[in-house]
Image (cartoon, helix red, strand yellow):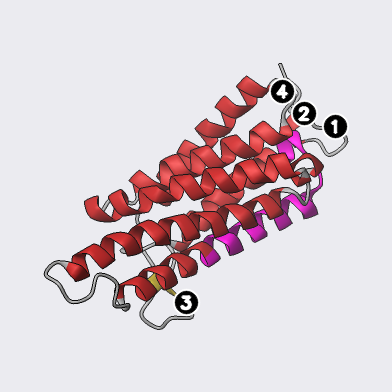
Amino acid sequence: MKWDVLRLDILPRPPPRPRAVAVAALIGVATGLISSLPSPLPDVRLQNPDVLINAEGVPLHAGIAFGAGVGLISWLWAKRDPGKCLLAMALTLMGWLAAVNTANDAMQAVVGSELFGTVEGAKASREVVGWVLGGLFGGAVGAGLTAFGAGVPGEAIRRPQAWGLIVVTGTLFGLLLYPAALADLVALLFVPWQAAVLAAIAYGLSRRS
């Protein structure tokens, strides 16, 4: 049995689009489930001293797992270049961290504002708006940097219609941040978001059936 997927001298063979999207979505489900597990890594403090990435919040290993998924897809269907695939992984991890920061900043800005005034329930309403905007902005930033990273080994991702689809997908699925926070279940965000974004990347890399 030949393990062509491991060979550097084999050019990637993008599969038909439906199969590529399905495979990428399954990889995203796997990375999303891994991301939802308690973090084995130490806490990482972000710019805001009140925000930590850890097992109780947003685990650092989630970005690593998702970055590995982007790197795997890039290796399979974009370019067998270890350096570029590792760079795609690193940029994806940076995007993950930036998304967390962005979502937190949006949440804090809305909750600390005077939106809805001082009427009864105003703070609760601000929190809802904060979660929604945080999910949208965070999803957009994370997906944008992920698209940039995937575009390093994958030239097809650099087309506006390809990276645009990735960003729009990440933005819309970022809305799941609110129900995930409400249910205190990060899998409600991680699994569908990662599956959808990886599927969008595969869509850009694959060929028409």
Circles 2 and 1 in contact, beta carbons < 8 Å: yes
Lateral position of residue 146 relative to residue 154, left or right: left
Residue furthest top as drawn: 209
Q: Secondary structure at mark 2?
A: helix
Circles 4 and 1 in contact, beta carbons < 8 Å: no
Q: Give the magenta range.
A: 74-98
Q: Disc 3 and disc 4: Cα gap in Å?
A: 39 Å
Three-letter residue code for mark 2: Asp
Residue at figure coordinates x 71%, y 40% from the top left:
161
Label 4, on which residue?
Answer: 15
Q: Disc 3 and disc 1: Cα gap in Å?
A: 41 Å
Mark 4 or mark 2, which is nearer the start of the sequence? 2
Tell which tag, 3 or 2, sits nearer the viewer.
3
Q: Is residue 123 magenta?
A: no
Q: Disc 2 and disc 4: Cα gap in Å?
A: 14 Å
- Seen from the viewer's position, the closer of residues 131 and 51 is 131
Q: Is residue 84 magenta?
A: yes
Asked if residue 36 shows in the view, the reply is: no
Residue 17, x across and y down, in percent: 67, 23
Three-letter residue code for mark 4: Pro
Label 3, on which residue?
Answer: 46
Q: Which mark is residue 10?
A: 1
Circles 3 and 4 in contact, beta carbons < 8 Å: no
Q: Disc 3 and disc 2: Cα gap in Å?
A: 40 Å
- Seen from the viewer's position, the closer of residues 35 and 161 is 161
Tell which tag, 2 or 4, sits nearer the viewer.
4
Q: Which mark is residue 4?
A: 2
Mark 1 or mark 2, which is nearer the start of the sequence? 2
- Number of other residues with Cα within 10 Å of mark 2, as a class: few under 14, some 14 to 19, many 20 or more: few
Asked if residue 33 shows in the view, the reply is: yes
Mark 1 or mark 4, which is nearer the start of the sequence? 1
